[in-house]
Image (cartoon, rainbow, N blue to C red):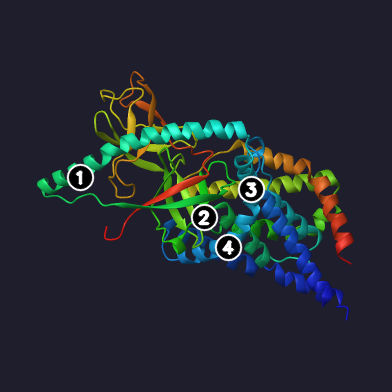
Amino acid sequence: MPLHPQERINRFEKNFSAYRLIIVVIISCVLMYQDYQRNYLSALRVYLSASLYPAQYLINFPRNFIQKLNTNFSEREQLLKENNLLKKDNFELRSKVQQVYKLESENKRLYDLLGSQPQTDNSYIFADIIAVSPIAEKHHIIINKGSRDNVLIGSAVADSNGILGHIIRDQIFGSEVLLMSDREHAIPIEIVRTSLRTIAVGTGNYNELKINTLPTNTDVKKGDILITSGLGGRYPEGFPVGTVKNVINNPGESFLEVSVTPFGNLKTVNEMWVIQPTEGY
Amino acid sequence: MNYQIRNLFFIWSMILLSIILMVMPVPDVLDQYRLPWLSMTVIFFSIFNISLIGIISVWFSGLILDIMTGGLMGENALILAVLSYLSYRFRFQIRVYPMWQIMIVVLILLSLGVLITLWIDGISGNMLFNIYDWINIGIAVLIWPIFMSIFEKMQSSFLE
């Protein structure tokens, strides 16, 4: 039955009423505040993002599929070359590992002698990338392991070369990783050569971190290797972070401008490890 | 009853299509040029076909976008609700405008969206002035006539 014109207008008026707008604005403000504080409503976000996980997977499927294809259908010659390289690498690494067992036991013995806590073992969970944040300034990625696979919020994420970032949100079937090149990210590091501890912050550029808290008389050189210091309790100790790209000493400034090239392939990462301490930490 | 289901299907497929366009992976060259498709869709329907959406459904579509992009939950939802409300309020004036004036109205609405984003990001402490936000709005306004004609065609072929 066709509605009376006046009735039709009223029907839509209800859908766009100012009361609804006010209610919606209040709810949004509460949601934003809670999300910003990361406390009460984080569970809501976990379930919402878990329910959208299939959509994320589907939307990003073409990209991931093409990348898989690229790796699977490479030339035979290239594969042989790669195989040879890997064999060589493997041989080298294995010879290096031989010494690690000795060092490990020695380290443990020394810790025992000192009477302090031995270092905890880490567990490694292998993960694949699902999605990259479409917002250019946000260096977030989504990986395919979440609390269903015992991944904890705050765990470090690394690829075969070095640290990538850490997990900030759980999505049950997946989780959200904040890369260390994000502007909001800072990582406690140690310069291997001098064992000086400091903090490197992201710049919003995938190939650069910066350290801007070192006084001008600090001993830091181009090519210095940086590892995680383990302070702050978020990142495990001793994982490679990057090398110092250059050190700028601006006259008149009281701090050095140190830029760092990360080891990990932050931009093109596909497979990675989630590193977290084993039980009893 | 059947036409209601068809309407619902039509509007939500349009909304989901816009969300997909906003979050799908693209080559690096195009990565900066992500148009505000969802805002455009919402503005279009709030002006020209108000029987299909309401503030609540617009708000939910914004919430989906927020979660898909990993942003602050509720940010885009708030902006879209406000844009939708404003376009609905002024729909009678806007409908009779010539195309260039409609484009100016769309420009104002989309800029308002970006300004609210900047404002919310400023409060939450990570405001970033990104010139591409404004470039994308410009592109969105320039393609608005094409966008509108496509949507009108789709409407006339899908809906009765």
Give the residue pinned by disc 4: A25
Label 2 chain ID: A
**Decide: marks 2, 4 in contact (CB < 8 A)?**
no
Is disc 3 surrounded by few (<14), some (14 to 19) or many (20+) residues within 10 Å? few
3 or 2: tag closer to the N-terminus: 3
Between A139 and A174, the one nearer to me in the picture: A174
Q: Mark 2 — residue?
A: A144
Visible in this render: residue A234? Answer: yes
Q: Is residue B64 left or right of residue A150?
A: right
- SS under mark 3: helix
Tell me the amino acid under the disc marked 4.
Answer: Val
Asked if labels 2 and 4 share a chain, the reply is: yes
Of tags 4 and 3, the one toward the viewer is 3
Question: Residue A65's mark?
Answer: 3
The residue that label 1 is drawn on is A105
Residue situated in front as seen by the camera: B111 or A66: A66
Residue shown at 58% from the left, 38% from the top? B130
The three-letter code of the residue at mark 1 reads: Ser
Q: CA distance from mark 2 to mark 4?
A: 33 Å
Q: Position of residue A133 (x, y in %)?
A: 56, 47
| Identity of the residue drawn at 74% across and 55% down | B41
Q: Are marks 1 and 4 in contact (CB under 8 Å)?
A: no
Number of the front mark, 3 or 2: 3
Task: Return the disc, 1 or 4, that comes first in the chain's sequence.
Answer: 4
Please state the horizontal and vertical placement of residue A121, each as a whole percent of the image: 29, 52
Q: Is residue A134 above or below residue A83?
A: below
For the residue labelled by badge 4, is the local secondary structure a helix, a strand or a loop?
helix
